[in-house]
Image (cartoon, rainbow, N blue to C red):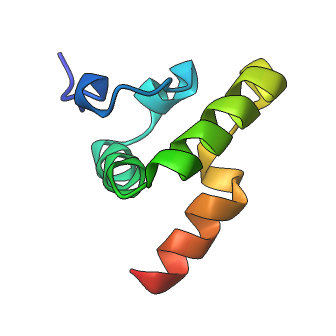
């Protein structure tokens, strides 16, 4: 069984395809999502709901900006 990050403590929706990413990429996504302030979580959930299965966190503006600062 491959290692997997537990996103449940973040209490936000996670795209199903995240489980297919490498463990390193999952850690990076977890770290990004754990830094979101409440109003950013609301915006994230709206985007997730509206885009459905086409939502890709790695292509989101927030994630791209965050990776530039880390």
- Decide which of 37, 23 is in the foreground and name it: 37
The tally of labels here is 0
Q: Residue at x 29, y 42 (%)?
A: 23
Q: Does residue 2 appear left or right of residue 40 in this picture? A: left
Above or below: residue 67 compared with residue 29: below
Q: Quadrant of residue 22?
A: top left
Position of the N terminus, as image quadrant, is top left
Q: Position of residue 42 (x, y in %)?
A: 60, 38
**Residue shown at the point (53%, 82%) measured from the top left:** 68
* Image location (x, y in percent) of residue 3: 18, 29
Quarter residue 28 falls in? bottom left
Q: Is residue 4 left or right of residue 36?
A: left
Residue 23 vs residue 64: left or right? left
Q: Residue furthest bottom?
A: 69
Going by the image, does 11 lie left or right of 64?
left
User: For the point 46% across and 84% down, which residue is it?
Assistant: 69
The foreground one among 4 and 1 is 4
Q: Hey, which quadrant is residue 70 in on the image?
A: bottom left
Viewer-proximal residue among 2 and 29: 29
Residue 58: horizontal and vertical position, in percent? 61, 51
Instruction: Point out residue 45 in the picture as x, y percentages from the top left corner.
Output: 62, 31
């Amino acid at each position: 069984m491959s290692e997997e990050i537990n996103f449940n403590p973040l209490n936000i929706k996670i795209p199903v395809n995240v489980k297919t990413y490498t463990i390193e990429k999952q850690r990076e996504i977890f770290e990004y999502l754990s830094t979101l302030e409440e109003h950013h979580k609301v915006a994230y959930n709206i985007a997730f709901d509206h885009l459905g299965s086409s939502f890709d966190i790695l292509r989101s503006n927030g994630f791209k900006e965050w990776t530039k600062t880390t």
